[in-house]
Image (cartoon, rainbow, N blue to C red):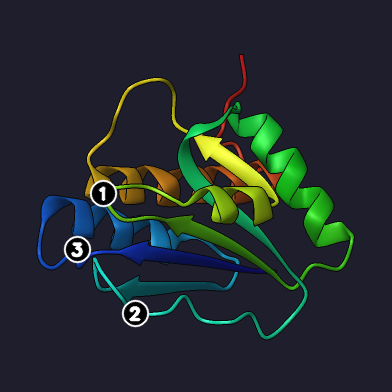
Amino acid sequence: MLLHVIARGKIARSPEAELVARYDKRITWPTKLTELPEIGGKIPDPQTPNKTVLLDERGKNLSSEELATIIGNWRDDGMREARFILGAADGHSKAERADADLLLAFGNATWPHLLARAMLMEQLYRVTTILAGHPYHRAG
């Protein structure tokens, strides 16, 4: 299953970009990173059966294991793509939230956009290692 991260704003050269690249290289599943301008620019239409996850402050605070279970079930149900969308500074519209398959939050704190992207990539790496039974993730 393709893990497709779609984010508004350019990450450019930054410590966060290095983290994103590090985890992107470590993920063994197919990945795609799409950057859109802060304003405008259309989210690409999916080409295959997919699920959409919006990173949103109103989202669920899931453990890594819970997220792995969800993504593993999607994969096992034949989904070809999981799209993880990070919105602009104003977040996602009410309609976008209603259409999403999952709203995901990284706790109650507000995170800088670039750091949230790096955190997402780490979680996707962690999810794939959990599903593969790899020791990277050591559940307590």
Judged from this view, the residue extending furthest toward the front is 94
Determine whether 61 is above or below 7 in the image: above
Q: Choose between 33 and 129: the one closer to the eye.
A: 33
Residue that label 3 marks = 11
Tag 3: residue type?
Ile
**Label 1, on which residue?**
89
Count of picture labels: 3
Residue 66 occupies which quadrant of the picture? top right
Residue ID at (66%, 45%): 102
Q: Amino acid at mark 1?
A: Ala
- In the rendered image, which residue does mark 2 sit on? 41
Q: Is 23 on the left-hand or right-hand side of 138?
A: left
Closer to the chain start, of discs 1 and 2, is 2
Asked if residue 133 can be seen in this view, the reply is: no
* Left or right of 83 on screen, residue 114: left
Image quadrant for the C terminus?
top right
Residue 90 percent location from the top left of the image:
30, 47
Residue at 73% x, 81% y: name it. Answer: 48
Query: Which is nearer the N-term, disc 3 or disc 1?
Result: 3
Residue 44 percent coordinates (x, y): 51, 81
